[in-house]
Image (spheres, rainbow, N blue to C red):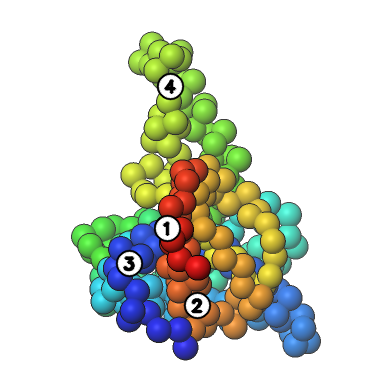
Amino acid sequence: MSDLSAIPSERFPRHIAIIMDGNGRWAVKRGLERVRGHQQGARTVREVVTECARLRKHHGGPDYLTLYSFSIENWKRPVEEVSFLMQMYIDYLQSERATMMENNIRFKQIGRLENLPEPVLDEMNITIEETSKNDGMTLVLALNYGSRTEITDAVRAIAEKVRAGQLEPSDIEESTITDHLYTAGMPDPDLLIRTAGEMRVSNYLLWQISYAELVVSPVQWPEFSKDDLHAAICDFAGRNRRFGALDHTNTLKT
């Protein structure tokens, strides 16, 4: 197990984003239906979420955990699997609200709300309301999410303000775009974790991860453990984040 006690709080990632990959392959490898992988993956979500909340309480971070739950492209999957995932999402929110309250977790959702079933929206709104006064870690679920869609929606909103005379084109800056994304008000991810060994970011938080540290784990999401999470955080803490500047750290050491 990786030792986090030696990591100072300022070296902890403030915002962790995770691409939870490998659920279906985990199930198929075991001769199971793909949906069984999603069920096991939901158990991993609970473990990782509660561990991140504990780390924030005792180590100072992360403040935000954003999980890629369902992409806009996922609607292309078989109808039965999509229906199962939507129902599983409803079940997750109903069953985990108590856990969120116990761990002082605030819930937030990002993505396009249209096309989501009404029961999903109902449970989402209930969870947002019930956890709104919590001041611990914020759990963000990206559902019906795609980063290009998010940026497109932001550009449309900015264009509407320009057309209405509320904003001059010359006044548009990077911060303007940031303030119109689904993640407005949130810090950018410091650490992006992808499971199952896939070396791509899959249309996830493309604007926000510009300077995120990437950790690719070979472990499929249903088997991703607290130890794997700790290892990723230790990896992050050991890196020198230059943000485009020269790195003068340890230049005198041999």
CA gap, disc 2 to disc 3? 15 Å
Task: Choose mark 1 or mark 3, whichever is in front.
Answer: 1
Residue 103 percent across, percent down from the top left: 28, 75
Where does label 2 land, which residue? Answer: 231
> Mark 2: which secondary structure?
helix
Where does label 3 land, which residue? Answer: 61
- Closer-to-camera residue (15/45): 15
- Residue 69 visible? The answer is no
> Mark 1: which secondary structure?
loop
> Mark 4: which secondary structure?
loop
Amino acid type for the residue under numbered disc 3? Gly
x 70%, y 80%: residue: 26
Which sits earlier in the primary sequence, circle 2 or circle 3? Answer: 3
Residue 53 percent across, percent down from the top left: 33, 73
Q: Local crowd at mark 1 within 10 Å, few (<14), some, or many (≥20)?
A: few
Residue 242 percent across, percent down from the top left: 46, 50
Where does label 4 land, which residue? Answer: 172
Residue 221 falls in which quadrant of the image?
bottom right
Where residue 249 is drawn, which disc sits there? 1
Where residue 33 is drawn, which disc sits there? none
Task: Choose mark 2 or mark 4, whichever is in front.
Answer: 2
Q: Name the side, left or right, on which 152 lies relative to 172.
A: right
Residue 230 percent across, percent down from the top left: 45, 78
Which sits earlier in the primary sequence, circle 2 or circle 4? Answer: 4
CA gap, disc 1 to disc 4? 35 Å
> Mark 3: which secondary structure?
loop
